[in-house]
Image: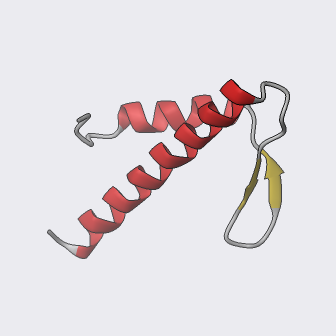
Amino acid sequence: MSEEELEHERCVDDDYAVVSQFYTAKRRYPTIPFYLRDENGETYEFGWSLIYQYLDKLAESSYPDY
């Protein structure tokens, strides 16, 4: 595998992990705020609209669903 393919797989795995953590937190504590910090150190509130963007991005990917 090339470095570019490995980086793409790592990004997809990271996206799946973020979505999974969000769903786990919301199942246990439905009103808990969920925050995401980007690589620049800025913090954003993570909500359902962002989850839908992640899911759309993952659905468009040619990454195999195991």
Q: Is residue 63 left or right of residue 47?
A: left
Q: Give coordinates of residue 7: x percent, y percent.
A: 35, 67
Q: Residue at x 37, y 61 (%)?
A: 10
Q: Give coordinates of residue 13: x percent, y percent.
A: 40, 52
Q: Give coordinates of residue 52: x percent, y percent.
A: 59, 28
State the image quarter where residue 26 is shown.
top right
Q: Is residue 37 left or right of residue 57?
A: right
Q: How is the image coloured?
A: secondary structure
Seen from the viewer's position, the closer of residues 20 and 4 is 20
Residue 15 visible within the image = yes
- 58 versus 37 height, above or below: above
Seen from the viewer's position, the closer of residues 22 and 40 is 22
Residue found at the far front of this picture = 28
State the image quarter where residue 30 is shown.
top right
Q: Is residue 54 left or right of residue 58?
A: right
Q: Residue at x 39, y 31 (%)?
A: 59
Q: Is residue 56 left or right of residue 33?
A: left
Task: Locate the C terminus by quadrant.
Answer: top left
State the image quarter where residue 51 is shown.
top right
- 20 versus 36 height, above or below: above
Task: Locate the N terminus by quadrant.
Answer: bottom left
- 44 versus 61 height, above or below: below
Q: Residue at x 40, y 50 (%)?
A: 12
- 17 versus 47 height, above or below: below
Q: Give coordinates of residue 14: x percent, y percent.
A: 47, 54
Residue 48 visible within the image = no
Q: Residue at x 64, y 38 (%)?
A: 22
